Image (tube, helix red, strand yellow):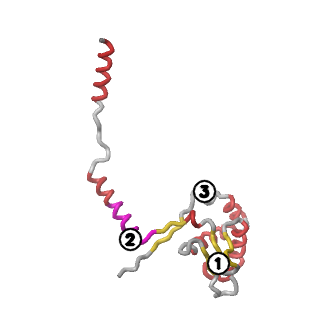
Amino acid sequence: MAINKRYYWIKLKEEFFTDKRIKRLRRISGGDTYTIIYLKLLLLSLKDGGKLYYDGVESDFIKELALTIDETDDDVMVTVNYLINQGLLEVVTENDEYYLTEIPNLIGSETAWAEKKRRYRQNKQRTLSLMSPTHVRQEIEIEKDIEIDKEREGEI
């Protein structure tokens, strides 16, 4: 029996980097790093629908998160505090669960079967488009004949 994998991805909006909250984050000293940390947090929370959990491996959530995403404690602390202040991260339960509020708008997923079926349909569509001509020349003479007939009727 095959294991049915599920694939997740982030769909960044076209205006992600022009969003005022992200622009402000990037203008802070080290802001590019903080933006990358935010993107890493989004990726980390994909499977859980935007939730980040504290497992108790480190002494607090910030240190554990820094360990998980390979960033410094200070950078993660600044990013998390900024995200909380801007409403991009909510504390669900103190030190146990956090929720990234923008994730429902940014998440996409599909099963391996859905991906296989989508590829099959694309290949089928490509095959059909190669078999039948996409641009067919139509006769314009009929329209001209109708106009000539109308002109003749007008003269009579």
Which-is-in-front pick, marks 3 and 2?
2
Identify which amino acid the numbered label 1 is placed on: Glu
In the image, taking residue 11 as reference, residue 26 lies left or right, namely: right
Label 1 sits on residue: 97
Q: Using the numbered discs, state the Cα–Cα distance from disc 3 to disc 1 in whole angstroms.
A: 28 Å
Q: What's the magenta bit mostly, secondary-structure-wise? A: helix
Choose top left, top right, bottom left or bottom right for residue 114.
bottom left
Q: Using the numbered discs, state the Cα–Cα distance from disc 3 to disc 2 in whole angstroms.
A: 32 Å
Label 3 sits on residue: 15
Is residue 113 highlighted in magenta?
yes
Which-is-in-front pick, marks 3 and 1?
1
Task: Name the N-terminal-most of marks 3 and 2.
Answer: 3
Residue 125 on image: x %, y %: 33, 57
Q: Using the numbered discs, state the Cα–Cα distance from disc 1 to disc 2 in whole angstroms.
A: 32 Å
Please name the residue shown 72% across and 77% down the image.
74
Q: Kindly give the residue lying farthest to the front in the view shown.
A: 93
Which quarter shows the C terminus? top left
Marks 3 and 2: CB-CB under 8 Å? Answer: no
Mark 2 burial class by Cα count in 10 Å: few <14, some 14-19, many 20+:
few
Range drawn in magenta: 110-123
Choose top left, top right, bottom left or bottom right for residue 119.
bottom left
Please name the residue shown 68% across and 71% down the image.
90
Residue 38 on image: x %, y %: 63, 70
Which quarter shows the N terminus? bottom left
Label 2 sits on residue: 113
Q: Kindly give the residue lying farthest to the left in the view shown.
A: 131
Residue 154, labelled with which disc? none
